[in-house]
Amino acid sequence: MSAEPIRVLLADADPLQREGWRLVVDAQPDLQVVAEAPDGVQALAVLRRVPVDVAVVDVRMPRLGGVQVTETIGSDARIRLTQGAPVTRVVLVTATDLDRHAGPGREAGADALLYKDAPPDDLLAAIRAAAALRRVAP
């Protein structure tokens, strides 16, 4: 019997970016995109309804950015109820200035920070590593 696939949320304002990530992620037998969101507010709404192992979240989105989404994942009671323990893991992505976002992203609880144009293998590795942290956490 095979293990359940890693459930992934893609959150980015650019529909073409999300579609590209979806093609890469869904091509993997151990990964499945279960939801998408065009902004941080909608990403949180999804997390309150849909079980997600790893959220790939853009640092700069309309209405609520990725660092704020990451902070909220750990503190929102409805998200914790839907996701169970441990909480959904986060891979933050940015188009620019990785160094500027690394500190705040880590402090908020992100497991990885990548450039949006990172090679697909880097994105997949970050998702899998984050999911592994979720599965072994107490």
Image: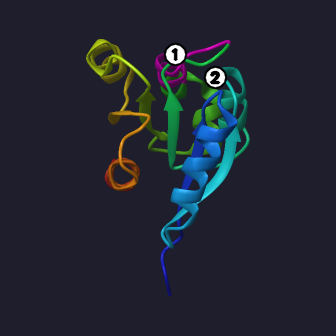
Residue 102 placement: quadrant = top left
Residue 136 included in the magenta stretch of the image: no
Would you place residue 39 above or below residue 11 in this image? above
Residue shown at 48% from the left, 75% from the top: 3
> Would you say the magenta stretch is mainly helix, strand or loop?
helix
Residue type at mark 1 is Gln
Please tell me the numbered disc located at residue 40.
2
Q: Which residues are magenta?
A: 63-72
**Amino acid beneath label 2:** Gly
Depth check: 121 or 4 in front? 121
Few, some or many residues within 10 Å of mark 1 (<14, 14–19, 20+)? some
Say if residue 18 shows up in the picture: yes
Q: In the picture shown, does residue 57 fall above or below 132? A: above
User: Disc 1 marks which residue?
Assistant: 68
Left or right for 11, reference 88: right
- Residue 58 pos. (x, y %): 51, 27
Where is residue 108 drawn, in percent x and y? 39, 20
Disc with the residue nearer the chain's start (1 vs 2): 2
**Which is nearer the eye, 72 or 38?**
38
Is 37 left or right of 6, judged from the image as shown?
Answer: right
Q: Position of residue 85 (x, y in %)?
A: 48, 44
* Residue at (44% x, 25% y) in the render: 95
Q: Is residue 52 visible?
A: no
Residue 115: horizontal and vertical position, in percent? Answer: 37, 32
Q: Residue at x 40, y 53 (%)?
A: 120
Query: Could you say whether the residue bearing mark 2 is in a helix, strand or loop?
Result: helix
- 3D distance between C-alphas at marks 1 and 2: 8 Å
Tags 1 and 2 touching, CB below 8 Å = yes
Badge 1 element: helix
Residue 121 higher or lower than 40, as above or below: below
Q: Which mark is residue 12?
A: none
